[in-house]
Image (cartoon, rainbow, N blue to C red):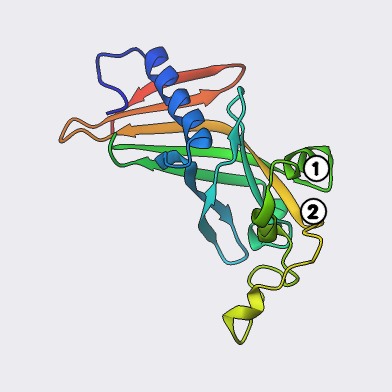
Amino acid sequence: MLFSENESLTEIWQSLVHELHRGALDPKHPFRYTNLGTIGKTGPEIRTVVVRSVSKELDFYIFTDFRSEKVAELITNPAASLHFYHPSKRVQVRIKARTEVHHQNELSQRNWLQVQGEAKKAYSSTLAPSTPIQEFKEAFDWTESGDAHQFTVLKIIPDSIEVLQLNGTNHLKISYSKTNSWAGQRLVP
């Protein structure tokens, strides 16, 4: 369990923040991968993405190709949601947020320096993501330089965080919202 009913909202917040930061640092942590929800042309869209870092302010950073559908969706409507689940702690975290798309600017250039070796290919395909192809091998054509031309950083800025601790029939639920600082409220699950 991540938290129990005997802990204060502050103690629970500290545990939650610790786990979210660990997810960005530890490749084996369940919070390393999150589901990113956006609003597409025909309705909600969801996909799994990698959390690359989490700031002290609790902003989440995700790398992607500028030509991906999620970028177009977030440019049109910057509202997003993140969904995490930790199976051994039996806790679900849902985050409602707004997004900044950083492409060919100081933030994206600084983060491009963190991308090493073969990983650069994920952002330097000659074909855009979701381009129809006849054979899978067509997808494995990358620019020779592995340049940062399409590399994009999504900065996910949370507005509210809802945490559900599963515990038999005694589930616990808390919502944290941010005005000037984060404040929590216990909820009926």
Residue in the picture at 72% in, 72% down? 127
- For the point 62% across and 17% down, the residue is 180
* In-front residue for pair 55/161: 55
Query: Please, what is the three-letter code of the amino acid marked with disc 1?
Result: Gln
Residue 148 is labelled as 2
Q: Is 82 on the left-hand or right-hand side of 87?
A: right
> Considering only vertical position in the picture, is 50 above or below 29?
below
Q: Residue furthest front?
A: 117
Label 1 SS: helix
Q: Are marks 1 and 2 in contact (CB under 8 Å)?
A: yes
The residue closer to the viewer here, 30 or 173, is: 30
Q: Residue at x 68, y 48 (%)?
A: 116
Badge 2, how many Cα within 10 Å: few under 14, some, many 20+? some
Q: Position of residue 15 (x, y in %)?
A: 40, 21
* 177 versus 50 height, above or below: above
Which quarter of the rendered picture does the C terminus lie within? top left
Instruction: Tell me the SS state at disc 2.
Output: loop
- State the CA–CA distance, disc 1 to disc 2: 8 Å
Looking at the image, the residue that sits furthest to the bottom is 134
Q: Earlier in the sequence, mark 1 or mark 2?
A: 1
**Residue 76: image x %, image y %?**
71, 54
Residue 109, numbered circle: 1
What residue appears at the point 57 percent right and 33 percent down from the top-left corner?
A: 158
- Residue type, label 2: Ala
The x, y position of residue 68, in whole percent, is 67, 62
